[in-house]
């Protein structure tokens, strides 16, 4: 593949109104308005083909851009199949690659066919090996075949043209092809056994043109080796594969096919990404694993199809053992269908599309998918897509992680035994993590400074996992007072931040959290001032984020953390020298392994001046620090800052790869006083959707892993461990500490106190309409720092009363007694 491979995009707006509108409601329910419910489909949609996937597909097909939004991830914790996999990332202690923005070449090329196993030479030393046919694709995606027949030639012609522009294959049946001879190498022929019979003998095309076709790839809808051999005779220059229904336990049959010389198997699941009721990824893994065990995996290539609906599905299918994927239903979505919501009623099903428009929509979609694949590979530290095949060590599987996680808890109880508090009848705001109830109860505390009155749910959301499935045993006793509170003055809630005894000043917090980093650019100056004023009033800290240190924060310098991120925006010696804590941000949970991204519309004149950049341009922070590729380099960074400010404590903010425990202990030995593990639920900046829910492990799994490893290394008492990335409530704080953290860093909850309703429009246009995540001079006036700081202080006072109530129920006097007591937590199992 050329290192300059590029998929050309251009706008392809729909010449019609999209056939359905959607709104995300509680429990991931998607409701369709303005159209009748079609037989066999429900108003909630499919659990696989969600409205999120459909509408994001429309956006990508129209623009060629990847979906980006703010506000962190608010969807389900995990699910089956693709939704139960997170991809890994590299950080500090492993080599990293940065090919997303052209700084390194990352290849998305894959090869289909049977590789030559060994070279053979004659007595004269001349090569006599027959080189098998191979197909190189610049992208591990094949188009088609279409899952349903469509009227007219436009869809098929569009697929063929899109395949030409992308450089891939489109699969068609003999009766569906159009001018196959002129389509060149971008047609793959899908044959039934009857089609093959009509195509033989080789010198006779039967009058239907099947034999007249000449191309690179043929696949036969059969598992019969004899038929495959006949197809090889009929198409000697092509790679020939067999199409099989994917199912668990298929490995034996595929192994026999590999031994017989079959070059490719195309494993087909259903449109919901299941194989006879088993998730596609599980069935695929069983086939791949058997081939590996038999030493046959390199003898053939695997294509998988059925329910491939998003860019992350491509990477996850490869990690589970596929060489490439074939897409089908997503093509209809690219052409404007909403599948379950408008069955039979969209424009393409009515024959109202044009070939060039159809081609451009598919081309745009695949360009956006490739960009997201590059994002994922860059985060994982992978330079070649073909090396992702079967790399399960570079993925995190919820089934195994949850089993390990549950084993560290105090037991499992039915979810029905957890007494939920009241929920509003209309879930008009928020998402699955920040439900309407959590928003309202948090804002009530911000107004009153009192703990919740107990009538509205203020402890958990409805993500279906993580913190939302954990409870303290006292919460299950069925007593009337289900949200106890107590006087914080009767308990020791403080947190000491310097445990290294290295001669630097002791820094103590009155309670176990501080304000997480939010940069000027992602939020406006009034928000930063509100947070700094609240930190001063409470005796804690707030972090500048990576956008620099605005001058209006200087009066609060004793309570402001200077963040040094990979872009070094606004970092100067004086900003380092004035801070009691310096924070290195290696990665953030909202976009782990991807660096930072501030869209041009938010890079106003004042933001550009502070960041020393050009106004109106998008600003990227690289991943990683390009001066840090090892723990030794990391130590040099810390030594540099310590030279500039020898009094400051050092905090290191990282995401949660599979080796996050090694990252943490490496940071400790490099000289960090504080390690902050950042999960995916937070964030106000622009984050690709592919990153927010698909890369790095959830914070709930990372905390106990790091805590226990630091204990095993004998250094747990010498470093402070903080958790961040979606800590919403006092109960989340307590649960994080029980899992092994010393405290938390809070971001989004402070914005909720200021009026955030989780619209997710942080990066759209001028930003948040409530003036929170905006740099627009007029819009930012919606937040008044003189009032905002009081709301943050009030909310935290409510939290302190609840945290004291939790300790009181547990019979503890100090917050430190709770650390690592995961045995006090139970897992809530079952359906809501």
Image (cartoon, rainbow, N blue to C red):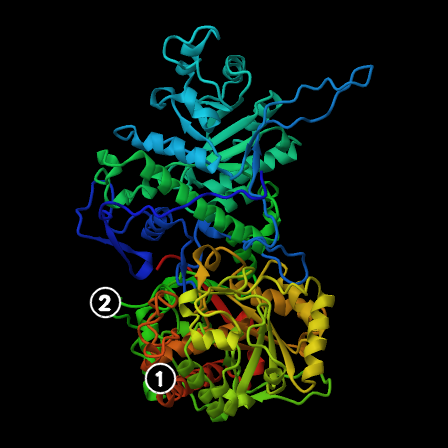
- Which residue is tagged 1? 446
Q: CA distance from mark 2 to mark 1?
A: 22 Å
**Would you place residue 327 above or below residue 788 in this image?**
above
Q: Visible in this render: residue 829?
A: yes
* Residue at (44, 72) in percent of width and height: 522
Mark 2 or 1: the one toward you:
1
**Would you place residue 529 above or below residue 3 in this image?**
below
Q: Visible in this render: residue 53?
A: no
* Residue at (49, 73) in percent of width and height: 735
Percent x, y for residue 308? 42, 42
Mark found first going from the N terminus, 2 or 1: 2
Secondary structure under the numbered disc 2 in the rendered image: loop
Percent x, y for residue 697? 54, 59
**Would you place residue 44 above or below residue 644 in this image?**
above
Q: Is residue 98 left or right of residue 430?
A: right
The quarter of the picture where the N terminus appears is: top right
**Would you place residue 396 above or below residue 824 in this image?**
above
Secondary structure under the numbered disc 1 in the rendered image: helix
- Which residue is tagged 2? 426
Give the quadrant of residue 31.
bottom left
* Count of numbered circles on the image: 2
Nearer to me, 682 or 130: 130
Percent x, y for residue 491? 51, 90
* Residue at (47, 43) in percent of width and height: 7
Label for residue 31?
none
Percent x, y for residue 542? 51, 82
Does the CB distance between marks 2 and 1 fall below 8 Å? no
Nearer to me, 103 or 685: 103
The quarter of the picture where the C terminus appears is: bottom left
User: How dense is the environment of label 1, judged by Cα within 10 Å: few (below 14), some, or many (20 and up)?
Assistant: many
């Amino acid at each position: 593949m050329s290192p300059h491979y590029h998929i050309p995009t251009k706008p392809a707006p729909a010449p019609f109104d999209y056939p359905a509108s959607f709104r995300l409601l509680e429990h991931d329910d998607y409701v369709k308005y303005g159209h009748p419910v079609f037989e066999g489909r429900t108003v909630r949609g499919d659990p696989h083909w969600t409205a999120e996937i459909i509408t994001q597909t429309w956006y990508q097909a129209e623009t060629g851009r990847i979906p980006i939004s703010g506000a962190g991830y608010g969807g389900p914790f995990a699910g089956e199949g693709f939704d139960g996999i997170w991809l890994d990332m590299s950080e500090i202690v492993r080599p990293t690659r940065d090919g997303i923005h052209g700084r390194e070449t990352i290849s998305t090329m894959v090869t289909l066919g049977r590789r030559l196993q060994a070279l053979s030479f004659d007595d004269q030393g001349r090569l006599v090996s027959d080189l098998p046919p191979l197909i190189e694709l610049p992208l591990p995606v094949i188009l088609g075949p279409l899952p349903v027949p469509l009227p007219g030639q436009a869809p098929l012609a569009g697929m063929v043209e899109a395949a030409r522009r992308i450089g891939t294959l489109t699969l068609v049946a003999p009766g569906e092809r159009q001018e196959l001879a002129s389509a060149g190498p971008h047609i793959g022929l899908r044959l039934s056994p009857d089609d093959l019979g009509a195509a033989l003998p080789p010198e006779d095309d039967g009058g239907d043109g099947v034999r007249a076709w000449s191309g690179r790839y043929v696949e036969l809808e059969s598992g019969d080796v004899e038929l495959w051999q006949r197809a090889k005779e009929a198409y000697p220059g092509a790679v020939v594969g067999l199409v099989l229904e994917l199912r668990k336990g298929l490995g034996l049959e595929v192994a026999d096919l590999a031994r017989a010389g079959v070059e490719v198997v195309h494993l087909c699941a259903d449109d919901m990404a299941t194989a006879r009721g088993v998730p596609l990824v599980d069935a695929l893994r069983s086939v791949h694993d058997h081939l590996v065990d038999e030493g046959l995996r390199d003898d053939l290539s695997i294509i998988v199809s059925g329910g491939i609906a998003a860019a992350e599905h491509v990477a996850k299918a490869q990690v589970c053992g596929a060489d490439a994927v074939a897409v089908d239903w997503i093509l209809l979505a690219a052409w404007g269908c909403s599948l379950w919501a408008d069955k039979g009623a969209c424009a393409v099903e009515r024959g109202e599309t044009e070939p060039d428009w159809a081609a451009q929509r598919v081309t745009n979609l695949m360009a956006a998918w490739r960009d997201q694949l590059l994002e994922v590979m860059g985060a994982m530290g992978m330079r070649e897509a073909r090396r992702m095949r079967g790399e399960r060590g570079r993925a995190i599987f919820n089934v195994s992680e949850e089993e390990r996680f549950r084993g560290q808890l105090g037991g499992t109880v039915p979810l029905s035994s957890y007494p939920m508090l009241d929920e509003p009848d209309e879930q008009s705001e928020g998402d699955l993590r920040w439900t309407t109830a959590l928003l309202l109860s948090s804002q009530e505390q911000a107004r009153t400074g009192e703990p919740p009155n107990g009538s509205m749910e203020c402890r958990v959301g409805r993500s279906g996992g993580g913190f939302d499935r954990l409870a303290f045993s006292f919460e299950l006793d069925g007593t009337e007072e289900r949200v106890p509170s107590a006087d914080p003055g009767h308990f020791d809630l403080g947190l000491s931040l310097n445990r290294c005894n290295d001669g630097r000043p002791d820094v103590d917090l009155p309670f176990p959290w501080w304000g997480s980093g939010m940069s000027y650019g992602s939020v406006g100056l009034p928000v930063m001032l509100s947070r700094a004023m609240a930190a001063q009033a409470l005796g804690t800290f707030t972090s500048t984020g990576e956008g620099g240190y605005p001058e209006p924060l200087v009066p609060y310098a004793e309570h402001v953390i200077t963040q040094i991120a990979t872009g070094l925006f606004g970092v100067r010696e004086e900003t380092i020298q004035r801070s009691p804590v310096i924070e290195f941000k290696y990665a953030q949970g909202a976009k782990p392994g991807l660096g930072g991204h501030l869209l041009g519309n938010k890079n106003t004149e004042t933001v550009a001046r502070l960041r020393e950049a050009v106004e109106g341009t998008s600003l990227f922070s690289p991943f990683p620090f390009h001066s840090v590729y090892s723990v030794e380099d990391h130590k040099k960074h810390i030594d540099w800052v310590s030279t500039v400010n020898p009094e400051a404590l050092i905090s290191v903010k990282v995401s949660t790869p599979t080796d996050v425990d090694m990252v943490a202990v490496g940071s400790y030995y490099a000289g960090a006083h504080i390690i902050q593990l950042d999960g995916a639920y937070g964030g106000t900046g622009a984050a690709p959707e592919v990153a927010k829910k698909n890369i790095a492990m959830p914070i709930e799994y990372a905390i106990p892993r790091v805590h226990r490893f630091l204990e095993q290394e004998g250094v747990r008492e010498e470093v402070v461990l903080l958790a961040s990335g979606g800590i919403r409530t006092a109960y989340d704080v307590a649960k994080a500490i029980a899992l092994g953290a010393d405290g938390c860093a809070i971001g989004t909850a402070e914005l909720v106190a200021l009026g955030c309703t989780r619209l997710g429009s942080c990066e759209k246009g001028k930003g948040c309409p409530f003036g929170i995540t905006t740099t627009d001079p007029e819009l930012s006036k919606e937040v008044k720092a003189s009032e905002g700081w009081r709301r943050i202080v009030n909310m935290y006072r409510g939290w302190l009363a609840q945290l004291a109530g939790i300790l009181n129920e547990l019979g503890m006097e100090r917050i430190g007694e709770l650390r690592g007591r995961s045995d006090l937590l139970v897992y809530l199992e079952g359906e809501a």
